[in-house]
Image (cartoon, grey):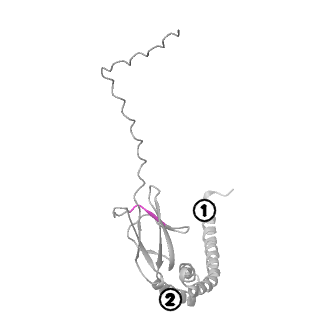
Amino acid sequence: MLSARRLAPLVTAFVFLAAPRAAHADDAQDAAACNPAYEEADVLLRAGGTKLLDAKEKLLVCASPACKPWMVKECTKLLSELEARLPSVVFDAKDADGQPIVDATVSSGERALAERLDGRAIVVGPGERTFVFTTPDGRRTTVTAIVREGEKAQRVTAVFGPSEAPAAPPPPPPPPAPPAENVAPPPPVDSPAPER
C-alpha cells in the first residue's frame, strides 16, 4: 500500500497533467461554437427588429477568446455597432391618484424584465411590445408600446386603476316598530243574534 507521503506527488502530478486536457476540451468546444454563432449572428442582424437581442447573444459567443482572432475582431466590431441599435426602456407605474408605484414587476411574454421599478434602463428588442405590470397584491395592467430601434431610455408608463373597493356592507335592518302607547283594545265583535 502506498503511504500518504508517496501518494501526494502522484496526485499532484495527475492534477497538473489532467487540468490542461480538460481546459483544452473546453476550448475546443468553445471554438466549435464560433463559426455557427458567427453565421447565425449575421442572419439575425440582417433580419433586424425583434431578432437583434438574439444576434447579441450570438455575437458574444463569436467574440470570445476561443475563436479565431479575425472572428473575434469582426464580432467585437459588430457587437459595438449593435449596441447602438438596441433600444432601452425605463418603466414607470402610477396608481389612480398619480402616486408612483415602485414595487411592481414587469414582464413581456415569458421573459421577466424588472423585479422592481427603480428607474434603470432595460435593453429590449425593437418593435411592438406588450409589457405586463403586476403589483404585489396581484393587480395587473398591460401596456403596448412601439419601441424604436436605437432609442435609449424610452419611458413606458402603466397607470393602475383604483383598487377594487370591498363590497358594501348590507344595509342595517329596519328599526323595530315603536311600542304601542295607551291604545284601546279593539272593540268586541258582536256576536250574531240567535235565530228565531
Would you say 78 lies left or right of 158 here? right
Q: Is residue 64 visible?
A: no
- Residue at far right of view: 1
Residue 154 screen position, x and y as percent: 41, 77
The structure residue drawn at horizontal position 55% and vertical position 69%, both measured from the top left corner, is 109
Q: Disc 2 and disc 1: Cα gap in Å?
A: 48 Å
Label number found at residue 40: none
- Quadrant of residue 55 in the image? bottom right
Q: Quadrant of the N terminus?
A: bottom right
Across the whole image, how many numbered discs are drawn on residues? 2
The structure residue drawn at horizontal position 36% and vertical position 33%, both measured from the top left corner, is 175
Label number found at residue 8: 1
Would you say 195 lies left or right of 31 here? left
Frontmost residue, 56 versus 20: 56
Note whether 69 is above or below 94 in the view shown: below
Which secondary structure class fits the magenta region best? Answer: loop
Residue 11 screen position, x and y as percent: 62, 64
Residue 30 screen position, x and y as percent: 61, 78
Would you say 109 lies left or right of 120 here? right
Tell me the mark number nearer the camera, choosing from 2 and 1.
2
The structure residue drawn at horizontal position 56% and vertical position 91%, both measured from the top left corner, is 70
User: Label 2 neighbourhood size at 10 Å, few (<14), some (14-19), many (20+)?
Assistant: few
Tell me where the magenta segment starts and ends, as one range. Answer: 102-106
Would you say 167 lies left or right of 59 here? left
The structure residue drawn at horizontal position 30% and vertical position 22%, both measured from the top left corner, is 181
In the rendered structure, which disc, 2 or 1, sits on the residue that comes first in sequence? 1
Residue at numbered disc 2: 77
Q: Is residue 149 magenta?
A: no
The amino acid on which the numbered mark 2 sits, given as a three-letter code, is Lys
Frontmost residue, 36 versus 40: 40
